[in-house]
Image (spheres, grey):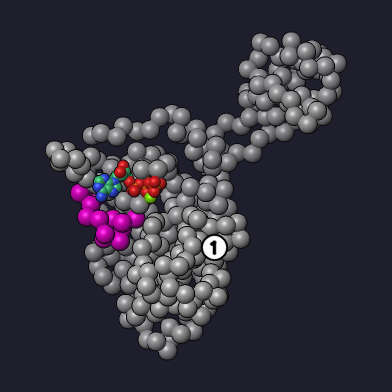
Amino acid sequence: MSEAILNITNLVKDYKTGFTGKKTRVLKNVTFDVYKGEVFGFVGPNGAGKTTTFKSILGFVTPTEGKIELLGKEHSDSGAKSRIGYLPENPYFYDYLTGEELLYYMGELHGLKRKYLHEKIEELLRKVSMEHAKKMQMRKYSKGMLQRIGIAQALVNDPEFIILDEPMSGLDPIGRREIKDLILEEKRKGKTILLSSHMLSDVEALCDRVGIIMGGTVIKIGNIGELLKEIHTDYEMHLEGPGDEVKQCVKDLRVEMDSRAGYIVLKFDEDIKRMVLEAVTRTSAEIVSIHPLRKSLEGLFVEEAKKGNPQKEQ
Ligand SMILES: Nc1ncnc2c1ncn2[C@@H]1O[C@H](COP(=O)(O)OP(=O)(O)OP(=O)(O)O)[C@@H](O)[C@H]1O
Ligand SMILES: [Mg+2]
């Protein structure tokens, strides 16, 4: 196993809410590691605790319990933080600044010299396709433009560890493609990336491993391929012929029947594949195709969500 860049152990966060100050536990023993050179996806429904976990790593939120080690150091160590890049979920920047000014400002906060920054900023503006708007005040930026400049500022210090809270949010398809390429380029340079996203197809395409968090509890962690093996596969069969006859034949089996583009479409579980095949061959309908439906992270996510969200209260 390669070197861990981040170790989170039994992270707990309680928030006081309402007038009574009643405590709500929003993170419940969150434990996971992120290893050097990987892209780790943190996914979960709205309110699951992704942003709270990220803010805890960065020290913007004080954990109630638990331990966070960052780049081999206690996470409160400021030396470690200077080697991190962070895109917040709702980037709020000083919006009277231009995009270019923001990048200089962030770079200088990291102690970088203007001379070095000039080249770096030009390169980043090019990568996020924002050269044309670099002299525009950010209050005039669209949501996608803010997101692009937000990603650029997360990379201005050439960080070893990049934390991106919903990097694809608000981007058009071209923007999503560009940002995905940018993330993969950073990975190729040996950087480590932790990101959250609701775009599960992007997570599938980008991430080596994922953690699924629901109701403040990490319910699954692993390599995407391995996690997908755990979910059952549905099959889809396309037929041509008399629908009534097919319907009659599969009526005792757990089969969903539909029609699409002139074909009869049957959807069923892997376990009964043989039975369905036997049943339809007794009809005069012709089997045009049979194929497994692709397993996806979305399928896994929905399956886990159906099992029920872990308890909210503690
Ligand atoms: N400052 C706060 N005070 C009280 N409760 C909070 C605070 N910040 C977050 N929460 C609660 O913590 C829980 C987790 O929120 P968090 O923002 O971490 O979720 P998330 O997984 O990032 O969701 P989303 O996908 O919507 O961004 C939510 O129930 C939220 O209401
Ligand atoms: Mg969030």
Q: Nearer the viewer, residue 95 or 77?
A: 95
**Residue for point 57% across, 31% down:** 232
Q: Which of 162 and 189 is in front in this view?
A: 162
Report if residue 59 lies within the magenta region. yes
The local crowd at label 1, few if under 14, some if 14 to 19, many if 20 or more residues have their Cα within 10 Å, is some
Q: Which of 225 and 288 is in front in this view?
A: 288
**Residue for point 19% across, 40% down:** 18
Instruction: Please provide the residue range marked out in magenta.
Output: 54-66
| Amino acid type of the residue that numbered disc 1 sits on in the rendered structure | Ile
**Residue for point 36% across, 82% down:** 112
Q: Is residue 284 above or below residue 176?
A: above
Which part of the image, by quadrant, shows the C terminus? top left
- Which residue corresponds to mark 1? 179
Q: How many labels does the image show?
A: 1
Q: Residue furthest left?
A: 20
Please tell me whether mark 1 sits on a helix, a strand or a loop: helix
Q: Where is residue 10 in the image (x, y as percent from the top left)?
A: 27, 47
Residue 234 location, quadrant = top right
Q: Position of residue 200 (x, y in %)?
A: 53, 47
Q: Where is residue 158 in the image (x, y as percent from the top left)?
A: 43, 74
Q: Position of residue 101 (x, y in %)?
A: 40, 78
**Residue for point 52% across, 78% down:** 123
Q: Is residue 6 above or below residue 45?
A: below
